[in-house]
Each structure stands twice: as structure tokens, then as C-alpha cells.
């Protein structure tokens, strides 16, 4: 729409004398350029092909009425205001046109040629003002939607944080209590000189202290990742070495739960990564697989080279699986996997998979899960192959 300068007007009038006089009257103001059509059909074609600041249409046309033309224009979403010209004594028709969306009507009497330029200018000005109002209303509507969504997300985040604090409090209290009770039993001389029982209590203490350390590490890592302060020490690494080290570390835990841990193909190109951080990801994923797989179950780890110059590592378990609706959500902060197995440990902070996602994405890779309820889960992530990384560098 033109906001300054000459206004582009379409005049639809089948009487050539009336059309010429109306055109001259409108253009005499020096602010309007008038294009004439002599039928409603031709006028509608012009409206579809170019924009007009105003349409002035006679009500009585040889093919369709001005009111029908107005309705067709509305159906075609043509954004131009209409003025309808009516004959003397035809005010009811004019009222119908206004109800249908016309901005004004002008009765074709002896003075209408003098009235028409002013009516045209007022219709254009009002349409422009309405357009500004519509835009402001739309902006307000969108802002209100955004505010409502933001409030909803804040409420959800507040609820998540409440759950997170409760979960972390519980997670810290449990190993602290276990370590304290073990120490108290030793101090109270409950086992006398039975070194085997004492050593068992010390093992419980060490295990729970290590668990506390893991919780604290998760909180610190997440804080660094959120602040963008975790640095990656990138170097060429062998996938086989990282996988086997992780499997060796968690092998005893898998065997204690009577799980079969199988290592498949690892013959893939070397990758460029922060070795310790990738082992952290592997430890988290393999630890979850062990935690959520019932006794006598199976876990398999393997790797593949993929076409886009990356290496994919997969960890598959035979656990209860994950609802497909949760596949993306479980990688968000404070979310729990929610597929607990009888006898498994407590759920944790809900930060593990979020940390994994941040670490893998900082390597330029992706992490995702494929799973169905009662059909197990396969967690996968990609890392840049060494040769591909060199090209990118």
C-alpha cells in the first residue's frame, strides 16, 4: 500500500461518460491515478494482477453487481477498500454494501462528482489507519501468545527445578547416610576384630563416596556446559580403546547384575575428540543400559563408519524400552529416563543425558535414541572422523 504520493485507484463503471467524468474529478486533485474497467469481471482480473489503494465500483454493472464484486474480492483476500456508487433512492443497497465490508458509498446525484474525491481520500486514510490498528492488534496478539507460552515454560521449569532439588537432596542424603552408618558401625566396634566385615563396611563407604563424587561432577559439568566454559581438548582417538576401557570399568557391575556385555565391530576410522569427555558419555550410556536392563539381559556396543565423514557408536540394551514420546525429551535438563527396573539404583539428577548431549554437540556430533516399549533401547552418537576433521580444520 502506498502511504505517500499518488494513490492508485480502480474505477469500475460501465457508463463511459460517467467513467470519464469521475476519472477527471478524482485526478483533478493531483493525488490520484485512476484506471477504468467497464465490467466487474475485468475489474476483478485487474485486482488480482496488481494492487490498488482504492476500488470505486458502480453497484449496477452489466455482468455482476458491485456487491458481488466486493464479495469476490474478499474471497480472494484482496486488500483494497471499496466505495460503492448507488443510484438515488437506493440507500438500502448501500447499507447492504457497508455490511458486506465496503468502506463507504456515494449516491450518484448532481453533486456526487464533487463529493467523490473527498470520499475517496477519507476511505484510503481510514483503511490505512485500520491497517495500522490491525498490525498493532496482531503484534499484541502474538506478544500475548509468546508471554503465555513463556509463563507456561517458566511454570514447567519451576516445577522441574523443584523436582530436581528434591531428587538431588534425596540422592545426596542416601549415600551420605550409608557412609555414615557404615562408619558408625565400625566406630562402635560392631565387628570386633572381624577384618572381613570391616573391609566390607569400608567398601560400602568408598562406593557411596564415589557416588557422591559423581553427583557433584554432574552438577559442576552441567554448570560449565550451560555457561559455555567447558573446554574440549581435541586429539586423534581410537574408538576401540575408549569403548574397551569403558566396558572394562563397568564390566564388574554388569556381571554382578548377571548381564551379558558384548562388544561388536569397532573397526572404524579414528576420531578427533576429547578422550575423557567421550569416555564420560560412554560411561553414562553404558551405565544407564546396565541400570535399566533386567538380570539375564544383554547389552551390546559397536561402531560404524557413516557416509558424512563421521563415526557412529551404538549401545543397545534389552531393557523395557522408552516411550517414543520421550525420545527427545530425555536429553533435556532435569528429565528422568523413567524406565526403572526392579532392584535398580535411584534415578539420579536427570542431568546425565543432557550433559552427554552437550558434550557430543560440542564435538559437532549428534546423539539420539531408538526405542520402543518392551523392545529395548539403542542409544547412538556420532563423532567426526579424523580425516574429515582435518579437512574441516
Image (spheres, rainbow, N blue to C red):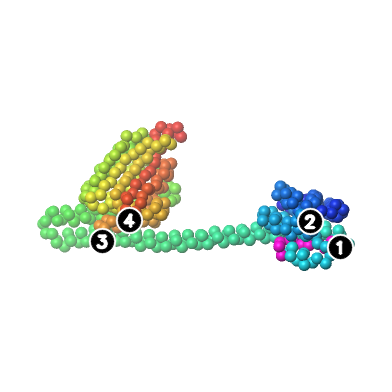
2 or 4: mark nearer the eye: 2
Mark 3, Cα crowd under 10 Å, few <14 / some 14-19 / many 20+, is few
Mark 2, Cα crowd under 10 Å, few <14 / some 14-19 / many 20+, is some
Q: From what the image shows, is residue 99 above or below residue 270?
A: below
Label 1: state its secondary structure.
loop
Q: Are marks 2 and 4 in contact (CB under 8 Å)?
A: no
Label 4: state its secondary structure.
loop
Image check: 341 left or right of 49?
A: left
Label 2: state its secondary structure.
loop
Q: Earlier in the sequence, mark 2 or mark 1?
A: 2
Q: Which mark is residue 177?
A: 3
Give the x, y percent position of residue 112: 85, 61
For mark 4, what is the residue? 339
Q: Earlier in the sequence, mark 1 or mark 4?
A: 1
Give the x, y percent position of residue 138: 62, 59
Front residue of this view, candidates 10 and 70: 70
Mark 1, Cα crowd under 10 Å, few <14 / some 14-19 / many 20+, is few
For mark 1, what is the residue? 109
For mark 2, what is the residue? 61
Amino acid at each position: 500500500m502506498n502511504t505517500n504520493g499518488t494513490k492508485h485507484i480502480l474505477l469500475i463503471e460501465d457508463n463511459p461518460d460517467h467513467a470519464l467524468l469521475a476519472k477527471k474529478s478524482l485526478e483533478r486533485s493531483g493525488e490520484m491515478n485512476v484506471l477504468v474497467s467497464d465490467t466487474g469481471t475485468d475489474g476483478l482480473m485487474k485486482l488480482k494482477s496488481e494492487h490498488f489503494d482504492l476500488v470505486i465500483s458502480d453497484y449496477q454493472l452489466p455482468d455482476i453487481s458491485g456487491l458481488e464484486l466486493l464479495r469476490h474480492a474478499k474471497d480472494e483476500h484482496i486488500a483494497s477498500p471499496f466505495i460503492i456508487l448507488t443510484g438515488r433512492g437506493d440507500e438500502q443497497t448501500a447499507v447492504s454494501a457497508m455490511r458486506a465490508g465496503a468502506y463507504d458509498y456515494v449516491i450518484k446525484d448532481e453533486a456526487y462528482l464533487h463529493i467523490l474525491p473527498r470520499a475517496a481520500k477519507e476511505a484510503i486514510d481510514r483503511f490505512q489507519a485500520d491497517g495500522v490498528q490491525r498490525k498493532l492488534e496482531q503484534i499484541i496478539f502474538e506478544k500475548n501468545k509468546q508471554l503465555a507460552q513463556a509463563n507456561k515454560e517458566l511454570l514447567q521449569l519451576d516445577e522441574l527445578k523443584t523436582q530436581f532439588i528434591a531428587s538431588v537432596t534425596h540422592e545426596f542424603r542416601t549415600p551420605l547416610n550409608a557412609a555414615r552408618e557404615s562408619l558408625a558401625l565400625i566406630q562402635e566396634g560392631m565387628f570386633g576384630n572381624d577384618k572381613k566385615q570391616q573391609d566390607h563396611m569400608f567398601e560400602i563407604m568408598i562406593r557411596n563416596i564415589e557416588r557422591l563424587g559423581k553427583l557433584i561432577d554432574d552438577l559442576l559439568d552441567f554448570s560449565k556446559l550451560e555457561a559455555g566454559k567447558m573446554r574440549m581438548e581435541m586429539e586423534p582417538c581410537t574408538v576401540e580403546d575408549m569403548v574397551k576401557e569403558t566396558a572394562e570399568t563397568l564390566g564388574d557391575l554388569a556381571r554382578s547384575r548377571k548381564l551379558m556385555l558384548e562388544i561388536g565391530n569397532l573397526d572404524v576410522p579414528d576420531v578427533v575428540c576429547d578422550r575423557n569427555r567421550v569416555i564420560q558419555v560412554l560411561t553414562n550410556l553404558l551405565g544407564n543400559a546396565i541400570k535399566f536392563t533386567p538380570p539375564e539381559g544383554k547389552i551390546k556396543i559397536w561402531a560404524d563408519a557413516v557416509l558424512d565423514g563421521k563415526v557412529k557408536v551404538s549401545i543397545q540394551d534389552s531393557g523395557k524400552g522408552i516411550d517414543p514420546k520421550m525420545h527427545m525429551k530425555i536429553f533435556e535438563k532435569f528429565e528422568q529416563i523413567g524406565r526403572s527396573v526392579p532392584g535398580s539404583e535411584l534415578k539420579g539428577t536427570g542431568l546425565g543425558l543432557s550433559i552427554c548431549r552437550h558434550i557430543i554437540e560440542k564435538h559437532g556430533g549428534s546423539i539420539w535414541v531408538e526405542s520402543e516399549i518392551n523392545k529395548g533401547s539403542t542409544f547412538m552418537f556420532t563423532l567426526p572422523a579424523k580425516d574429515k576433521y582435518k579437512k574441516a580444520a
